[in-house]
Amino acid sequence: MRNRRLEVTIRVAIAASFAMLAAGCVTVAAPAPTGKLAVADAAIADAISADASQYDAADLDKARRKLARAHDEVTDGNYRVAQDLAEEAEVDARLAATRARATKSANAAAAVQASIRALDDEIARTAR
Amino acid sequence: MKPWKAIGIALPAVALGACAVMPAHDAEVEDARAAVLSAQNDPQVVSLAPVELNKAIDAMRRTDAAWSNHDDVGEIHHLAYLAWTQASIATQTARLKASEASIATANGERDRLQLEARTREAARAEREAALAQQDAARAQAQADANRANALAAQQRAADAAAQAQAAREQADAARQQAADAQAHAQSLQSALSELQARPTDRGMVVTMGDLLFDTGSAHLNPGGMRVVDHLVEFMNAYPHRRVSIEGFTDSVGNPASNQVLSERRASAVRLALIDRGIDPARLEARGYGEDYPVASNTNPAGRQMNRRVEIVISDVNGVIGSRPSAPLANIGRGPRG
C-alpha cells in the first residue's frame, strides 16, 4: 500500500511537473502577434487608399518591407521580432498615409487660394 | 523576462556596471527625443494634433523607461523609432489639419468672393440694361422726332400743294372772271348794238327816232315800246348803270310848245321804264326843245332826225357825262318855217 501511495505521489508529482513545465513554456514564449500584423496590414491598406504610393512612396515601401519581414519572422517563430516589425510597419504606414493626405490637402489649399486670386482679379477687372 | 529581471535584482552591481558601459546618450533615442520635443514646441501641432502628439510623448516615455530599465538596445531603438515616427505623424497630422482648416476658410472666402462677383455682375448687368433702355428711349425719341419731321414735311408739302391748288383756282377764277368780264362786255356790246347805240364823248347813246312816237304826240307806238323793252332788258342786266333821257324837237312851230313836247316825250320814256320795274333813281329825264339839233331843219329829212329822244347810258359807276354847256344852238338851223 505504501509503495502504491508513493507511486501515486510520484505520478502526481511528474504530472504536476509536466504541467508546470508546460505552463512555464507558455509563459516564456510570446504568442504570435496576429493582432499587430492585422493592424499593420490595415494601416498599409489605408495608406494605399490615401495615395501614399504617389505622395510618400518611401515610407509606404518601408512599411511593406517590414510587414513582409514580420510575416517571415512569424514563420520562423520569432514572435518578439515579428511584433516589433509589425509595430514599426504600422507607424510607417500611418506616417505615409498622413503625409500623403497632408500633401494632397496642401495642394488643394493652394488650388483654392489660386482660384481666390483669380476671382479677386476678375472682381478687380469688372469693378473698372 | 522574469529570469532576466531576477538576475538584475540579484546582481545590482552587474546592472550598474552595464549602465555605466552603455553610452549616456544614445543617438537614436536623442533623435527621437528631439523630434518629440520639436513637435511639442510647435503650437500648431499642440493645438491641431493633440492625440498624435500624446502618442509620441507616450512612446518617448516608454523609450525612456526602457532606457532606465536598461532594456535590450534593440528594444530601446525600436521604441525610439516608434516615438520618432509618431512625432512625424503628429507633425504631418497638424499639417493636414492646418491645410484642411485653410481650405475651409478659403472656401468661405471663395464663396464670399463669388457672391461678390455675382453681385457686381448683376449690378453691371443692371447698369447695362439701364443704359440700353436709355439708348432705346433715345432711339425712340429720335424716331418720334423723325416721324414728326416727316409729318411736318408732309404737311408742308400738302400746304404747298393746297397753295398751288388755290393759286391754280385763283388763276382759274381770274381767267373765269376775265372771261366773264369779256362775256359781259360782249353782251353789253351786243345789247347796245341791239339798241343801235353809238359811242359819244358822254358815253353810249341810244337814239329813239321820231317814228317811234305818234305824230306830234308823246305817245310811244309799238316800235317805241320795243326799244323800251330792249332798254329794260339792258338795265336789268347792268344794274349799276343809269340813264339820262333827253327829248328834242325840230324848229318848226312855237319853241315853247316844242320844249313841252320834248319834255313829255322824255318823260314818256321814263315812265315806260318805271312801269317795267326800273328804279326811278336810275332815271333822269328832261327836254331840250329845239336845242341841240343833229341835222338841218331846212329839209324834212333833217327835221325828222332832229325830232328824237336820246338815251345816254352812264358808265359802270352810274356817272353820266354832262352835256356841253354851250348848246350847238344853230347847227344847220334854217329859217323858221
Image: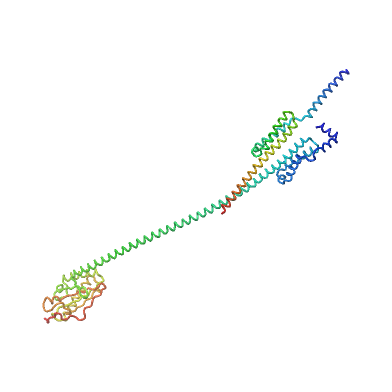
Vertical relation: A67 (above or below) B205: above
Question: Visible in this render: residue B114?
Answer: no
Question: In the shown orientation, is residue B93 left or right of residue B166?
Answer: right
Position of the C terminus of chain A by quadrant: bottom right
Looking at the image, which is closer to me, B195 or B143?
A: B143
Please identify the residue farthest to the top as the structure is shown.
A1
Looking at the image, which is closer to me, A68 or B258?
A: A68
Looking at the image, which is closer to me, A35 or B118?
A: A35
Looking at the image, which is closer to me, A63 or B285?
A: A63
What is the x, y in percent for residue A122? 57, 50
Please identify the residue farthest to the right as the structure is shown.
A2
Name the residue rendered at 67%, 40% in the picture: A99
Name the residue rendered at 68%, 44% in the picture: B95
How is the protein colored in the picture?
rainbow
Question: Visible in this render: residue A21?
Answer: yes
Vertical relation: A81 (above or below) B135: above
Q: How many numbered discs?
A: 0
Residue B326 appears in which quarter of the rendering? bottom left
Residue B5 appears in which quarter of the rendering? top right
What is the x, y in percent for residue B239? 25, 70
Vertical relation: B114 (above or below) A65: below
Position of the N terminus of chain A by quadrant: top right
What is the x, y in percent for residue B215? 13, 75
Residue B287 appears in which quarter of the rendering? bottom left
Vertical relation: B321 (above or below) A118: below
Question: In the shown orientation, is residue A31 left or right of residue B207?
Answer: right
What is the x, y in percent for residue B189? 21, 69
Name the residue rendered at 51%, 55% in the picture: B131
